[in-house]
């Protein structure tokens, strides 16, 4: 039996902070989305690409953390560590979504009150496993594979990438991995240029189209991050957290490119972000040192908050979307107080989840493993 004690490695504090910055942008995107008339005029236009950034960062961190430790690690041991890290907040997010479900009955989800409790409980229990539910069990009406906490779709694909890594792709030498990444990048680019929507959205519905999109959005960034962790030699870049954060923020807040007539231009831009800009931002973040105690605390706070924020914020966004739908035609200028309240609530909920749930549960699981 291989040793459960793997020891520790130096930590990339700036990458933790960078993950937190991306998580905050995801919240902003979801708050702006219901106010947009279409996907062409969201003021946080490319915010959904933060998910692709998370996949790339995940591949980088997993490669850095585990690639040279498989002499002490089993496949089961690796997967157990991933479940211990990811699953507690999956369960919390689904539970909170179930608690709030009936209170989000609104013009956008007019049939919520007709959903029987037994069906809600079945969807909740399935949601705990992250197994996607079929469209016949959609209790909200958005065709989500996880209608109690929409963001669960990305965790489903994260687990797929983790399984592929553990079961074999981790064994690929760098040249073979590079060929695999180039091929995956070509598929991503082709989809970006040919998708009629002119963007890289999709992956949250259990049908052939969305599963294909989810796999395309996952495979390239995750394994590009893995390759980056193997071949990059981080340097010493001054103000690395500032520059890498600005890079991520700017590309995610960039207005829609090409408009309705040249949608392929927007697809090309988004592919450019995932294939080139995101790896560059991670390289910059990995190449920095934390020069001040203030910056170290900021990166630690953002890093600790990032996953709880991502996994719990949509519980409040459901209420916000319901409110917007009940006030048809409301503008950003009119909605911002409620949006700010929702954002503040999401931060408080995430921090409470971190301190009162995630950290204690993670400590208990580590104790049981050891």
Image (cartoon, rainbow, N blue to C red):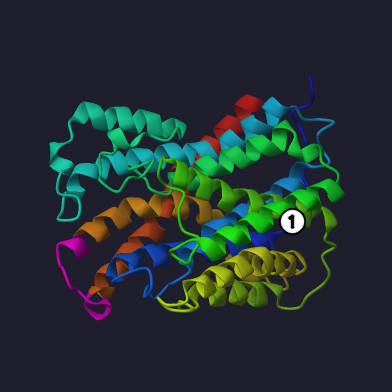
| Relative depth, front residue between 44 and 174 | 174
**Element carrying mark 1:** helix
| Relative depth, front residue between 153 and 290 | 153
Q: Name the residue under label 1.
A: 182
Q: What stretch is highlighted in magenta?
A: 323-334
Image quadrant holding the C terminus, namely top right
For the question of whether residue 359 can be seen, the reply is no
State how many labels appear: 1
Residue 216, percent across and down?
A: 58, 50
Residue 311, percent across and down?
A: 44, 49
Q: Is residue 270 above or below residue 348?
A: below
**Residue at image location 67% in from the left, 64% down from the top:** 275
* Magenta residue check for 325: yes
Which quadrant of the structure image shows residue 338? bottom left
Image quadrant holding the N terminus, namely top right
Q: In this view, does 343 lie above or below 259?
A: above
Q: In this view, does 130 lie above or below 216?
A: above
* Magenta residue check for 223: no
Give the farthest residue toward the top. Answer: 1
Residue 23, percent across and down?
A: 50, 61
**Residue at image location 45% in from the left, 31% down from the top:** 129
For the question of whether residue 69 can be seen, the reply is yes
Left/right placement of residue 56 relative to residue 210 reads right
**Residue at image location 44% in from the left, 63% down from the top:** 196
- Bin the neighbour count of mark 1 within 10 Å (Cα to Cα): few under 14, some 14-19, many 20 and up: some
| Relative depth, front residue between 140 and 14 | 140
Residue 12, percent across and down?
A: 72, 58
């Amino acid at each position: 039996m291989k040793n459960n004690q793997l020891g520790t490695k130096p930590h990339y504090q700036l990458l933790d902070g960078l993950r937190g910055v991306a998580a905050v942008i995801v919240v902003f995107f979801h708050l702006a989305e219901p106010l947009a008339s279409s996907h062409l005029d969201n003021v946080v236009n490319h915010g959904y690409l933060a998910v692709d950034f998370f996949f790339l960062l995940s591949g980088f961190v997993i490669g850095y953390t585990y690639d040279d430790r498989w002499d002490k690690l089993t496949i089961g041991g690796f997967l157990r560590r991933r479940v211990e890290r990811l699953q507690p907040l999956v369960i919390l997010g689904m539970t909170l979504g179930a608690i709030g479900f009936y209170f989000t009955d609104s013009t956008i989800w007019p049939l919520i009150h007709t959903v029987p409790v037994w069906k809600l409980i079945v969807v909740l229990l399935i949601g705990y496993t992250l197994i996607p539910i079929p469209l016949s069990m959609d209790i909200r009406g958005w065709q989500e594979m996880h209608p109690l906490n929409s963001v669960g779709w990305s965790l489903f694909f994260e687990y797929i990438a983790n399984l592929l890594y553990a079961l074999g792709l981790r064994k690929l030498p760098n040249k073979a991995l590079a060929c695999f990444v180039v091929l995956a990048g070509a598929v991503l680019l082709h989809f970006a240029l040919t998708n009629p929507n002119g963007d890289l959205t999709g992956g949250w519905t259990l049908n052939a189209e969305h599963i294909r999109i989810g796999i395309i959005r996952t495979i390239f960034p995750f394994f590009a991050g893995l390759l980056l962790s193997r071949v990059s030699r981080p340097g010493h870049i001054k103000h690395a957290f500032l520059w890498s954060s600005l890079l991520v923020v700017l590309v995610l807040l960039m207005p829609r490119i090409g408009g309705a007539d040249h949608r392929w231009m927007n697809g090309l831009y988004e592919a450019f972000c995932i294939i080139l800009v995101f790896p560059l931002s991670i390289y910059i973040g990995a190449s920095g040192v934390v020069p001040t105690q203030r910056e170290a605390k900021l990166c630690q706070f953002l890093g600790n908050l990032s996953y709880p924020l991502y996994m719990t914020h949509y519980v409040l966004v459901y209420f916000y979307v319901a409110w917007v739908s009940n006030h048809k035609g409301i503008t950003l200028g009119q909605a911002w107080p409620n949006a700010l309240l929702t954002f503040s609530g999401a931060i408080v909920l995430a921090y409470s989840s971190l301190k009162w749930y995630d950290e204690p549960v993670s400590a208990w699981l580590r104790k049981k493993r050891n």
